[in-house]
Amino acid sequence: MSKMRSGFTLVELSIVLVIIGLLIGGVLKGKAMIENAKIKRVKSDIDSIVAAVYSYQDKYSYLPGDDRNDRTTDLGATGCTGGNGNGLFDQGAIEYACAWQELVGAGFISGDPTDNDEATNPKRTPFGGRYLFRYRNNYNGKSGNYIYVENIPTDVIKALDEKYDDGQYNAGDIQSPTDYNTQNNAYADIYWFAF
């Protein structure tokens, strides 16, 4: 009597390999979907911040933070006793923090209008960094107010720049101090000239 050898047939092995391939493909596709959702969220956040700033300007005739009026009482923006009203975020930390406080106090974004600490009061990116208001004079040919987006993966910066601007790290409305074409798997900042 001959002994039968037990083991897997080629059909069984191929089915297992197909299942493993489908699982790996699903995981990779899921990861790409999550990354794409984060990229879209950054753009959506920028759009909502810009809309809030323009809504504030329409209602109060000044940019938030740059508002000449004392907004401590009417908006609850502690310490926001008035900017210089020149349309620029050029007074440093006071205007930067007050911009968020005044937007919150006016009801355009959520948060605490008494929080005057720029480390805690700005909106956060899906990557953990902050959106900050800034002004810069002549950065690669661009001058003006911008949203400083902290600590974003360079591949995300590249995707945003290619989709919503000119695709060059040092030109246009979306700029980065880091050449995202040569810095793979790194983190950098974005200067988004949205105003």
Image (tube, rainbow, N blue to C red):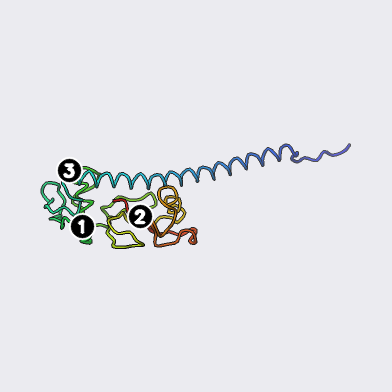
Measured along the vertical axis of the image, is residue 20 above or below residue 167?
above
| Kind of residue sitting beneath label 2 | Gly
- Image location of residue 113, percent across then percent down: 19, 49
SS class of the residue under badge 3? helix
Q: Within the image, what quadrant is residue 6 found in?
A: top right
Instruction: Residue at the far right: name it.
Output: 1
Query: Left or right of 73: which side holds 37?
Result: right
SS class of the residue under badge 2? loop
- Image location of residue 16, percent across then percent down: 67, 40
- Image location of residue 116, percent across then percent down: 20, 55
Residue located beneath label 1 in the image: 95
In this rendering, which labeled residue sits more in front, label 3 or label 2? 3
* Alpha carbons under labels 3 and 2: distance apart: 29 Å
Q: Residue 129: which numbered mark, if any?
A: 2
Q: Nearer the viewer, residue 101 or 89?
A: 89
- Image location of residue 183, percent across then percent down: 48, 61
Residue located beneath label 3 in the image: 59
In this rendering, which labeled residue sits more in front, label 2 or label 1? 1
